[in-house]
Amino acid sequence: MAYKALYRTYRPNTFLEVAGQRHIVKTLQNALKTNKVAHAYLFTGPRGTGKTSMAKLMAKALNCEKGLGNQCNECPNCLAINDGSHPDVIEIDAASNNGVDEVRDLIDKVKYAPIKGKYKVYIVDEVHMMTSGAFNALLKTLEEPPSHVVFILATTEPHKVLPTIVSRCQRYDFAKVSDRDIKARMVEILETEQIEYEPRAIDAIITLADGGVRDALSLLDQVIAYSGHHVKETDILELFGLAGTGEKINLLKAVANSNAKTVLETLEGFTRQGVDIKRLVADLLDILKDLLIYMRTSGGSLLTTLTSLEADDLLETINYELVPIYLDALLKAQQDFRYVANIRSLFEVVLLKLSHTNVAPVSETPPPRQKIVEQPKPEPKPDPVKQPIPEPVVTSQKQDEPYPEDDIDFAPVNGNGGPSINHVPKVALVEPPVKKDEDRPTIFEAFAPQQEAETKPLVIEGVVDAKLESSGDKITIDDDNIIKVMVSGLKDDKIALLNRWGDLASLSADLTIGRFAALLFDGKPYVLSKQILILEYDLPNLVDKINVSANQAVLQKIVRALLNRNVLVYGMTRNECMRLKKKYLELNQIRKLPDRRNLSIDVKGYTL
């Protein structure tokens, strides 16, 4: 029997099993109890929030043999609706049946009585895709259908539905499902499937799902296929190119400590891991939002990303006055990303600016906090002496308040020998965090062996008068052959290539091959086999350039300098990569992947 995805296997069978949408469930249940069933409903809301599932539950409640409003899942009507074979429950995909002829055919069949149940239920999915002519043909029937017919229209874009259609329906707006409801549903499924999990792994999937239960279960399905019967946070971070909370906290600490070297090294490490910069910025905003909530409420119950211990740890480094500044800067960076070609460079500039602005707000805030400290501890004499040099920070450090300055972590606890820690030269500020990093190892130590290789400049020989072509004959690889490349992928070689991918930046200024190197650097290695390197791109025009046959010679020479062998360089968009990854996982689940030992890969427009 073919594998059935989790979101289909665990589709709710009763109103009580629906995740979230309590207001809609209660309204429909009350309408059914009082026999006040409308002739037409409009279900709207984001994808994966339960619109189609609710429509099927409504159809089941109308036709259950145990009475109106019941969903016994035992009678022939309920069982037929569950497996999609009930003759009186008609599902129509308006994306492919959106013309006038299809609607007229539907209208002709509406007048016939139900065959098996009490009501004929028409579920029209993606109704906004219907043409204006089709909408107008449906108007009269939708307004006054036969008493045995109920229409349920579902859409993610209600503004595209004609107002005359909306006015004839009872409208129900589905909201994004809360994280708590999604988590409860996922935990229930994992326990049913007898799969072990880490709580933080579930939280990571919920963040990616963004309020959609179907998206959450699809991601969970993918993670289970990747990690087996133990869902771990590290697997999710690796699978979807994410960074761990601890690593993001360390990045914010480096910014707060004005440690530019650590900031840049951290970002370089994230790039090697394949972390998406836009997602990283969103995650940093979530952390800072939690930090702001924790400062205002002093309670951990409202935190969604951080724990109370992590918030306390972060507040020992970041001045509370700087949190709103960091939030504003990152929000502006999110807006600016759409206007720049290289978002990583923009993000680096933003973080470097933030690390520089660390000094100004800190020098302004000690006086008011000094007044607060003076009241409980009567030591007025030392403070006036130290007033010109902002040394009241030492007294606040003695009081162990949650307001440490830039390098307070690295000053002596008793305050001796380091009273001006916030105004030492820049060199002195950079050195202490290095010692701290040694005491607290981070992910970037794993990349230390590659640092020596990175210092060696790339040398590309034999390229004269190279011109990057934007059009011409293109290399193409169909889906079946891409799957073969994925099956024959070499993980260790890909990791080695990722470790050296940053070296391409040094070639971008080269007058001969700079444009080729920049084109490669804009992509991210997706799959590497013995003969083919597939790169992932955000923009389709970059894919078009990388796949022009005339550009292959120079591209292969540059990659050879990194990989020490010739490979075909092929580009795909991010959407194509995600689609083929899903197809690969589906084939793997049903054991239909091609045999790795006997592969013949065909590339149109190129001979391997």
Image: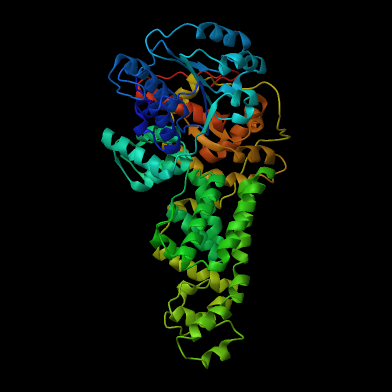
Q: How many marks?
A: 0
Residue 596 appears in the figure: no
Q: Position of residue 321 (x, y in %)?
A: 57, 68
**Which colouring convention does the figure follow?**
rainbow
Q: Is residue 309 above or below residue 402?
A: above
Q: Residue at x 58, y 23 (%)?
A: 168
Q: Position of residue 591 (x, y in %)?
A: 34, 21
> Position of 215 compared to 371: left or right?
left
Q: Position of residue 185 (x, y in %)?
A: 35, 38
Q: Position of residue 314 (x, y in %)?
A: 46, 63
Q: Quadrant of the N terminus?
A: top left
Q: Residue at x 66, y 18 (%)?
A: 132
Q: Is residue 260 above or below residue 503?
A: below
Residue 459 appears in the figure: yes
Instruction: Choose between 552 and 17: the one closer to the eye.
Output: 17
Q: Is residue 570 above or below residue 518?
A: above
Q: Residue furthest bottom?
A: 381
Q: Residue at x 63, y 13 (%)?
A: 137
Instruction: Choose between 568 and 54: the one closer to the eye.
Output: 54
Q: Is residue 417 above or below residue 78?
A: below
Q: Residue at x 27, y 34 (%)?
A: 192
Instruction: Classify residue 76 by image quadrant.
Output: top left
